[in-house]
């Protein structure tokens, strides 16, 4: 009888151990799935936040002072270019990298970097130069994305010439 009792205790212990291991494995697998979901959600949020700084420039009209603020803000960004077209300089001046900006449908390399860093942002504040950005002027803003939907640049085109 003593042996049967001991055998039952050992069997119950083994059964409880297997049950506990099974519960731990199930919890681990479900926690792993929850972690993957959380990582994907975090990645989506991170992408949205990185793009949020450009939403203010998405097909809007902004002032010349906002253009110069954008030049200051993004001038050291890698693989990024800003083109400013003013009333005196309709061809525009690139700051940072030069981008390919043909028509998005026709260009395989739309939004890609095609030239080295150029442009001196100090010229945007010098009234004597054709690159001068009038702080009270109005500019149409456009965001340039590459084929991977990464923001590569901004284009500002002056729509009105304000008097100084």
Image: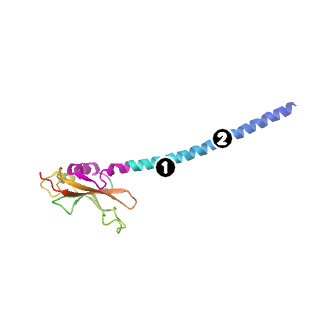
Q: Sequence-wise, which precedes: disc 1 or disc 2?
A: 2
Picture quarter containing residue 139? bottom left
Locate residue 9, reporting x and y percent. 79, 33
Q: Nearer the viewer, residue 39 or 56?
A: 56
17 lies above or below 100? above
The disc label shown at residue 40, or none: 1
> Is 59 covered by the magenta stretch?
yes
Mark 1 Cα shell of 10 Å, populated few (<14), some (14-19), many (≥20): few
Mark 2 Cα shell of 10 Å, populated few (<14), some (14-19), many (≥20): few
- Mark 1 element type: helix
Picture quarter containing residue 107? bottom left
- Give how far apart the Cα atoms at labels 1 and 2 are: 26 Å
* Residue identified by numbered label 2: 23
Locate residue 157, reporting x and y percent. 23, 58
Please report the bounds of the magenta region as a residue range: 50-77
- Residue 79 visible in the shown view: no
Q: Residue at x 29, y 53 (%)?
A: 57
Locate residue 84, reporting x and y percent. 23, 57
Q: Main secondary structure of the magenta part?
A: helix
Q: Nearer the viewer, residue 52 or 71?
A: 52
Q: Quadrant of the N terminus?
A: top right
């Amino acid at each position: 009888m003593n042996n049967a009792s001991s055998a039952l205790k050992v069997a119950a212990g083994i059964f409880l151990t297997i049950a506990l291991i099974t519960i731990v494995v199930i919890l681990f697998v479900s926690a792993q799935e929850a972690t993957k979901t959380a990582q994907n959600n975090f990645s989506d949020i991170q992408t949205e936040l990185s793009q949020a700084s450009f939403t203010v420039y998405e097909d809007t009209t902004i002032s010349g002072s906002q253009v110069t603020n954008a030049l200051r803000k993004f001038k050291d960004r890698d693989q990024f270019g800003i083109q400013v077209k003013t009333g005196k300089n309709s061809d525009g001046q690139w700051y940072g990298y030069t981008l390919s900006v043909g028509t998005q449908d026709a260009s395989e390399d739309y939004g890609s970097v095609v030239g080295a860093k150029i442009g001196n942002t100090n010229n945007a504040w010098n009234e004597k130069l054709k690159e001068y950005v009038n702080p009270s002027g109005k500019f149409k803003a456009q965001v340039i994305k590459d084929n991977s939907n990464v923001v590569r640049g901004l284009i500002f085109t002056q729509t009105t010439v304000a008097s100084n």
